[in-house]
Amino acid sequence: MTHNETPAAGPATRPDPVFTADAVFFWEGIARGELLGQRCADCKKITHPPRPMCPACHSVKRETVKLSGRGKVASWVIPRHPAPVGFAEAPIVALIELEEGIRLVSNVIDVGALDVRGGMAVEVRFAPTRGGKAVPVFAPAAGTARG
Amino acid sequence: MAKVAAIAGIGQTEFSKNSGRSELQLAAEASKAALDDAGIDPADVDGMITFTIDGNDEIGLSRCLGVRDLAYTTRIPGGGAASVATIHQAAAAVTSGACEVVVVWRAMNERSQYRFGQPIVPPSGGVVNVAGNGTGSLLWCMPFGAQTPASWEALATQHYMETYGVTNRDLGYVSVAQRKHAATNPLAWFFGKPITLEDHQQSKWIVEPVLRLLDCCQESDGGVAIVITSLERARDSKSRPVRIVASAQSIPCEVEVISNYYHADLNLMPEARGVAKRLYERSGLTPKDMQLAMIYDAFTPQVLKQLEAFGFCGKGEAKDFVKGGNIEVGGALPVNTNGGLIGEAYIHGMNNITEAVRQLRGTATNQVKNLTNALVSCGMAGAILSNG
């Protein structure tokens, strides 16, 4: 697998994301290769999952902010049975805690099942989906030992 | 004196993998059985409560039962998180005077007609409506290969297991204890089929390194119903009433159902801690006053996390608490004495409530001795039930 997790041959089979109207910005950003967070334009609190109102100051002025794409693995699992739909091999599903203090569910790529660890430093990559969209995935951060 | 609510009747169908009849028929049969158990005329029902995701309609069920005039209906979101919340809301409806006799039901062909354990992948991407499910799992997990409840639960649990050194083998003790209870419960799907810890360890991985097959609840067909009314009326009913001493819900900010990844401390279950605080405050009771705990056990780690949240042991101590027969009948705190959702059947948590009622009446198959108070919990809701 490459950093972009492009299969050696054939089209991507990963399911496309589904979303609510309030998360359109996130997936549009991913399609452009940008990991965007949602930030309150007034008090600057960053929130995930996205929402139309800030829970701290109740402003409805929302803005997007480019996230660092760096974080660490907070929790990880490998779904074995039933086999996940759209994956040739069982993926490592992980909860990633980003530097900005929010958590995202994603995949850890470029690391073996025996080598994934809680606290592992990771950075964002992008993987294609079957309908020509993309999702953010995470690889061991540069300078980190590979599995 | 304030009105007190009680459980006056319980009813159910058989638990199977293929009921051979409609979900509405299961709901009607279970409801009629519960009303017969209470000795209440179905025409007198004036309240109905179920889950948002139950496949049956209130009007359809009232047409079956011949309900004269419904005064109150509501549905509760969040999948199995609705189970004990039905008792809480029925009690609130009865004590407020909104209605007098509530039938709570959950009926499903969750094996023969559809299966919660299979991957959920919408046919095409785009904007979807997920209202009433209480979970962002479809939105934020599905395209990463986390497409089943087991995968969502496991991801919410691995961090906790790593923090406290909990192994999958530790989880096995829960499954072994509950299958022991199911083995002597003729109503249980796994009647006569106990397992050993080695059976658990040899069962296949569902989600590595957290859940094996024998850590997961069943997929079941069946219906369960419960009749709630005032304690005063329940005393005139046919069966021994079970008092709802306290009931509560708790949904702290950033908590969600099963894909519970966004609250501050992943080692805790804030919703169950919130329920515990409210139940103990409202009842004046403590964990030491409970002689039975019926805990929503969709997956074994749920039992560990709730034992800690309800104060039966400290943080990270549940892996030891569940060993040595402690959670079996005869142990310090019997848990899920019907076999639970793992051993008896998966009727979305409702069959764990009816077991608490049988225990408090003294009519359970695996009867706990000297029982006064039972905790029933589904994480986001709970109740303390009593025969005292």
Image (cartoon, coloured by chain):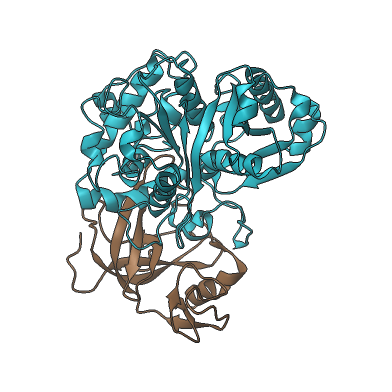
Chain colours: A brown, B cyan
Place of residue B328 in the rendered image (x, y in percent of width and height, measured from the top left): 30, 24
Q: How many marks?
A: 0
Q: Is residue A33 visible?
A: no
Which quarter shows the C terminus of chain A?
A: bottom left
Quarter of the rendering containing residue B92: top right
Residue at 48% in and 30% down: B352
Q: Is residue B240 visible?
A: yes
Left or right position of B146 against A77: right
Which quarter shows the N terminus of chain A?
A: bottom left
Place of residue A127 in the rendered image (x, y in percent of width and height, measured from the top left): 43, 66
Left or right position of B17 against B290: right
Q: Closer to the camera, A97 or B103? A: B103
Going by the picture, which residue comes out furthest to the bottom? Answer: A42
Vertical position of residue A90 compared to residue B144: above or below: above
Q: Closer to the camera, B74 or B13? A: B74
Vertical position of residue B3 compared to residue B259: above or below: above
Left or right position of B283 against A19: left
Q: Closer to the camera, B186 or B62? A: B62
Residue at 40% in and 19% down: B182
Residue at 28% in and 53% down: B159
Q: Closer to the camera, A16 or B61? A: B61
Place of residue B133 in the rendered image (x, y in percent of width and height, measured from the top left): 57, 51
Place of residue B259 in the rendered image (x, y in percent of width and height, measured from the top left): 44, 53
Quarter of the rendering containing residue B104: top right
Going by the picture, which residue comes out furthest to the front? Answer: B1
Vertical position of residue B115 compared to residue B120: above or below: above
